[in-house]
């Protein structure tokens, strides 16, 4: 129950940021946001996969992505801006940050992966809840979505040729992101020159 409320809290924070920027007619770096809670079955499967004992305490300490949010941005620089906006909130504690944009995983995965701890105020207590926040570009999201479907289809045993093609596609998506970032910077520079 606390994980659902933690997810609700983080979604509220992100939606407020989006609305604030939109209502102020300022550039909003967030394209779209989605969230999910891991099912009990998926929690059990992950616990087995990572050798986590199947106790509530061990799961709470060992599985950081029970509650997850994905924020999709247009540009690489937007992803870092959103990370600063999220982690800059006084009641959001950054537990872990992994920058897979600067250093992609070996399979080509790119994203900013954060684990944050936030307070959830219940009727009789305050619980600190971990929420995973993935921040990525549209291109990274497109690639990750297809990669996930392929891994699911092959039960995580993707044939080597297909894995190589996925890595090539990830590198192409990375180049596209870099190209779009340069175009974005050029547009911003021209706007700065405008009267």
Image (tube, helix red, strand yellow):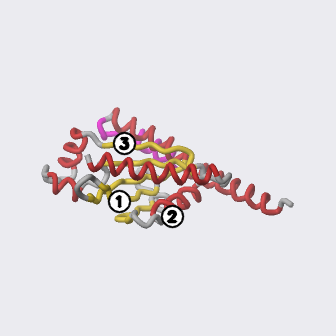
Q: Residue at x 57, y 46 (%)?
A: 31
- Kind of element beneath mark 3: strand
Using the numbered discs, state the Cα–Cα distance from disc 1 to disc 3 in whole angstroms.
17 Å
Q: Residue at x 39, y 35 (%)?
A: 149
Mark 3 or mark 2: name the one nearer the start of the chain. 3
Using the numbered discs, state the Cα–Cα distance from disc 3 to disc 2 in whole angstroms.
22 Å
Give coordinates of residue 151: x percent, y percent. 35, 39
| Residue that carries the numbered disc 3 in the rendered image | 36
Q: Quadrant of residue 186?
A: bottom right
Mark 1 or mark 2: name the one nearer the start of the chain. 2
Q: Compare residues 178 and 74 and report the one nearer the observer.
A: 74
Q: Compare residues 89 and 113 and report the one nearer the observer.
A: 89
Q: Which mark is residue 84?
A: 2
| Residue that carries the numbered disc 1 in the rendered image | 118
Assess whether residue 90 is covered by the magenta stretch: no
Q: Residue furthest front?
A: 123
- Kind of element beneath mark 2: helix
Question: Which region of the structure is painted magenta?
Answer: 155-173
With respect to residue 145, does 92 lie above or below?
below
- Kind of element beneath mark 1: strand
């Amino acid at each position: 129950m606390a994980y659902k409320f933690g997810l609700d809290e983080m979604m509220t924070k992100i939606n407020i940021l989006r609305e604030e920027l939109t209502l102020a007619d300022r550039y909003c770096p967030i394209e779209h946001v989605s969230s999910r809670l891991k099912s009990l079955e998926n929690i059990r499967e992950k616990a087995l996969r990572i050798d986590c004992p199947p106790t509530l305490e061990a799961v709470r300490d060992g599985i950081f992505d029970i509650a997850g949010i994905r924020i999709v941005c247009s540009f690489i620089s937007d992803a870092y801006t959103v990370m600063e906006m999220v982690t800059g909130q006084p009641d959001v504690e950054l537990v872990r940050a992994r920058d897979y944009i600067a250093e992609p995983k070996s399979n080509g995965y790119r994203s900013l992966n954060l684990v944050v701890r936030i307070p959830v105020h219940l009727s009789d207590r305050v619980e600190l809840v971990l929420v995973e926040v993935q921040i990525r570009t549209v291109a990274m999201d497109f690639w990750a979505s297809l990669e996930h479907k392929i891994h699911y289809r092959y039960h995580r045993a993707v044939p080597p040729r297909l894995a190589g093609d996925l890595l090539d596609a990830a590198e192409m998506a990375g180049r596209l992101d870099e190209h779009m970032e340069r175009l974005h910077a050029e547009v911003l520079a021209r706007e700065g020159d405008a009267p």
